[in-house]
Amino acid sequence: MKQINSPDDLKKLGVPELKALADEIRQLILGSVSRSGGHLASNLGVVELTLALHYVFDFKKDKLLWDVGHQCYAHKIVTGRKDKFDCLRKAGGISGFPDPAESVYDQFVVGHAGTAIATAIGMAAGQVHQGKNDKIVVLIGDASIVNGASFEALNNLGLVKRQLLIVLNDNSMAIDATQGAVAKYFSKVRLSQTYEDLRKTTSNILEHMPVIGKGVEEVVEKIKKSIRMVLPASQMFESLNIPYFGPVDGHDIGSLIQLFRALLHLKHPAILHVYTKKGKGFVPAERDGRRFHSTGPFRMNGDSIGAGSGRRTFTGVFGGCLAELAEKDKRIVAITSAMCDGTGLGEFRKKFSNRFYDVGIAESAAVDIAAGLARSGLRPVICIYSTFLQRSFDQIFQEVALQNLPVVFCIDRAGVVGSDGPTHHGLMDIGFLRMMPNMVLTAPADEVELRLALEFALGENGPVAIRYPRDFVPQERFVRAACGKPFKLGESVFVKRRKDSPIAIVSYGSVLKEALEAANLLAKEKIAVDVVNARFAAPVDKRIISLLGEGKCMITVEDHSLACGFGAAVLEMASATLQGPIGKPIAVLGAPRTAIRPDSRDVQLIEAGVNADRIAQRAREMLRPA
Amino acid sequence: MKQINSPDDLKKLGVPELKALADEIRQLILGSVSRSGGHLASNLGVVELTLALHYVFDFKKDKLLWDVGHQCYAHKIVTGRKDKFDCLRKAGGISGFPDPAESVYDQFVVGHAGTAIATAIGMAAGQVHQGKNDKIVVLIGDASIVNGASFEALNNLGLVKRQLLIVLNDNSMAIDATQGAVAKYFSKVRLSQTYEDLRKTTSNILEHMPVIGKGVEEVVEKIKKSIRMVLPASQMFESLNIPYFGPVDGHDIGSLIQLFRALLHLKHPAILHVYTKKGKGFVPAERDGRRFHSTGPFRMNGDSIGAGSGRRTFTGVFGGCLAELAEKDKRIVAITSAMCDGTGLGEFRKKFSNRFYDVGIAESAAVDIAAGLARSGLRPVICIYSTFLQRSFDQIFQEVALQNLPVVFCIDRAGVVGSDGPTHHGLMDIGFLRMMPNMVLTAPADEVELRLALEFALGENGPVAIRYPRDFVPQERFVRAACGKPFKLGESVFVKRRKDSPIAIVSYGSVLKEALEAANLLAKEKIAVDVVNARFAAPVDKRIISLLGEGKCMITVEDHSLACGFGAAVLEMASATLQGPIGKPIAVLGAPRTAIRPDSRDVQLIEAGVNADRIAQRAREMLRPA
């Protein structure tokens, strides 16, 4: 591995050396992810595929597009970033996803599924317009190709009249998680294959592959005919008019190289269907690919490190509450889009399998199905990370908000998310949801409130969105007696209140913890501070505005974009309510409109300006005589 | 027609009478749309289909879900709303789309494509949970079934283990507009059919149809085998594991009734593929279905009424400018998702067919393709209505904004849209776009500025969004000399400015016209008013905030949701800039968070609080001594 500093170095190796290199790369990935956490199973699965691609193509010039992008570790290692694997997904280190700012070998900062085929179509068209012919390769997984955006792109692949290779990395990800028709179809194909079949397919493709200049179309037809005898796999793509090759063994590096060399010459788009094994080379991950899809630090026997700390997360608390509430309320059903474990629905699924729906990576359909369930009289709870919920913007607006249907949105990973970085922060949900009619937005400050918020939401007759972060619940019981009160629509909790205090800190959601710490810091300096737990961002409690009437300054605090967030809602209400001049200034704290890099959540909260020190500092500035 | 006041009345008729009724309904639709405008061609196409569905099913109890919903006129006529057809799409009248507030026969307020299959899945699952077995029927067009959300739903149809009939209304809409693979596939199937084939298919299905209680699966297999000899159409749906029947003639009302009676008994989801003719029964619409898809008032010979008024629209001006700019700048390419005519791209397509992309109803893919084109060095201009752009929220964020790619978003139909109503207003684009990194938001006040904004956008190296309404450009040249200046990033135009004026009206976009009229009204009362044409909502010009420092009140004016809009951006900036108290109040005018009903744009602007009278009234209130 030492001498591999760029893909050019790869090209000096023979197949046996490449195999040895694959093993070394696996060890590097394993070591790094065991320490830092990250995506493991998929990365171990695509090592040979990645090496073969770099061996045949020249991605300094050619374009390699990763769908989702979480499987790009081997790619990063061979494109000059192996030394930075010590600080994978850490501050000052490298991202867990592709990033053009890191390397010319990366095309897009990605992290969400289903986008690569369409961006590749755009790049291919751009090449044609500019008279260029750099090769373009998309690597996409079987869980991602069923996303609506992928399908829209496949349906438009006819726009491309030149080379564009889609490598379908089929590691049975989708079939584990969901029962979608495409997943079933792939599974049926897979079950009909023997290893011998795979080898035969490979040689069939190679045998019939065109030499440059020969009639490509004719040859493709010939190949299809010769492999159709063995396999039924091509039907789905053929009906979309997409030439299909495979399936082939994605760990046979020698054959992959030959295949890519052959497919290089096609003058039209094509799909190569490749089988890989999730977690390849690390037994615990081979056994349980789902657990090792995205993991925290672990020991080499597969045991998690730090899992036994006993600290509870918002996700975990939510999962427990929902399962408990569902015991009594038979109307509750749960929906997610490939985030069952991530959103804490494991227990619910186990107890109420017939009231649980996982639709795969299909956020739009998930929301519409929830709308249908609500329309039929049930109480759907839809669990999606904030960053992925924005993929259902239009469905939330039209099928839920406009109809005023009682769908409960449980928005996990709201706010900054730590090491996943810019593509995964959930910093826009307050903004886009509070523009919609009928939408109620709420956020719990802690464990107790999460339960109260959920009970409240299930009792409403319209849509309610509950947001909470990817974080532990506050260890101390920050919420005072007053906060234990049931949630009431639009009602905040005045946690600290003194008529003569010069400033009020109004916080939304789990950052109440920071607001209270800031108040403690200021108390030491003899500055009295009101602290309000807003609970609702839509509607905003009018009593919050009345504090301004008392001549107090105000600071709003939220784990969200400064633009359009809770603070903006307070400003809007102040503007609408106070006909006279606003006596004192309102400061809005929140994330700037820039990409916040991978780091710990704590550091990112500082960058977003919403930790205790920053809040206290801002209060001092506001109170300083001009 | 007189005696048809509900679907029950239909059921008393025989097939010949139903045929006569179909003709009468066509005349009613034709008369009404010729006066009020609306969706014509598709509505004329589905009359027999609608009658047959209501004849067989009982949609007081059973559920009929319209995808998009623009083809529901015959449905409205037979469900007790024929008397209101005089005021279709008008204030106090009925909507051009389904609306549960109007009738128990409507399930969802819809207007966007691709949602009905997923909502139907949800409703079917809800039925199962509640031990009900009302029948569910989806009617979806061939242009809509290729949308990503539709595909996600089809992929998840396996969730439903009971009856759910999808009627695919294939009127070749998609093939006219686009070249997607599915459209091509349908077209191939269609071309392989003769009328005799269609009749044969119908009798084949009926002959083999199960009687209740018989082994359904087996019979379906038998049907499939018997029709596969004739037709290759089923392959696409079969690979998704969806039982497929057809294609059949969608105007043969007798056969349709028999088919629905037979398919009623299936205990699993199925697709019935039906051919209909766009514009059926009205020769000009049969000849040019696209022109009569959505039309303004017209004469019975097909001529438009009012088209020759000579008034230019923002859409028309944009189309002309782009085509002209593209002559000189070869990097310009244009993308749309089935809105070529609606966004004024007709001329561009004609002149630069190889630089034009219409991807069909696939907004997500459209944005990703634009991102790819930009990444490859071109200057893509993507043209989408505001209401549909929200379907690409995530793609705009991840593939464009986060990458800082120079994609120009030309957002037509921004603001209230008139008679299409709540599903189609474009009231959220400022809010969701201005949260994203790197996004520049601009809006022209008139024709001259539209051109300047476009020139500016094409000169930027990052994403720029330009919004303008579905409206004529202001007739007078409202923009003063100062506004003819080229656009400069974040620079507003002070149209009227007096140091001693007590109030400033700051407008964003085409509502500058209303702001200036308001200023004129106030001038008559000797109230001096500053008027600012903001030009940019992101970034906001800091000089606007400096007006507050001069002790003026301020009113912001925009054709957008009050929440998160331009006014909110001004409030945020004032809060961030002014460390001291804000001397005077800022009033934000904009649309409330409620569904604004179909009406003229003028009336809707009053409801949104942003016409000249309302602005002037608000100014008087603010200046009145407390």
Image (cartoon, coloured by chain):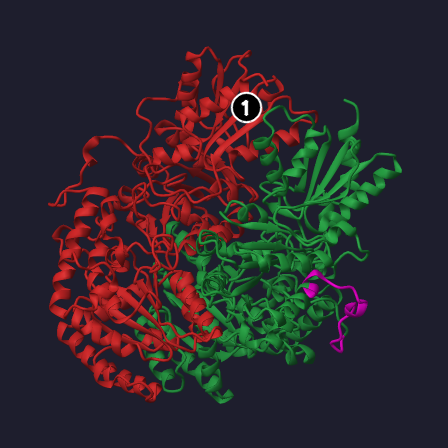
Chain colours: A red, B green
Residue A237 pos. (x, y %) = 35, 74
Residue occupying image coordinates x 18% and y 40%: A304
Q: Which residues are magenta?
A: B300-317
Q: Is there any visible trace of residue B73 in the rendered image?
A: yes
| Label 1 secondary element | strand
Q: Main secondary structure of the magenta part?
A: loop
Q: Would residue A255 be found to the left or right of residue A111 on screen?
A: left
Q: Quadrant of the N terminus of chain B?
A: bottom right
Between A94 and B239, the one lying in front of the other is A94
Residue placed under numbered mark 1 in the picture? A554
Between B433 and B88, the one lying in front of the other is B433
Residue A500 pos. (x, y %) = 55, 11
Q: Chain of mark 1?
A: A
Name the image quarter holding residue A203: bottom left
Report if residue B312 lies within the magenta region: yes
Report if residue A564 lies within the magenta region: no
Between A382 and B467, the one lying in front of the other is B467
Q: Would residue A193 be found to the left or right of residue A385 on screen?
A: left
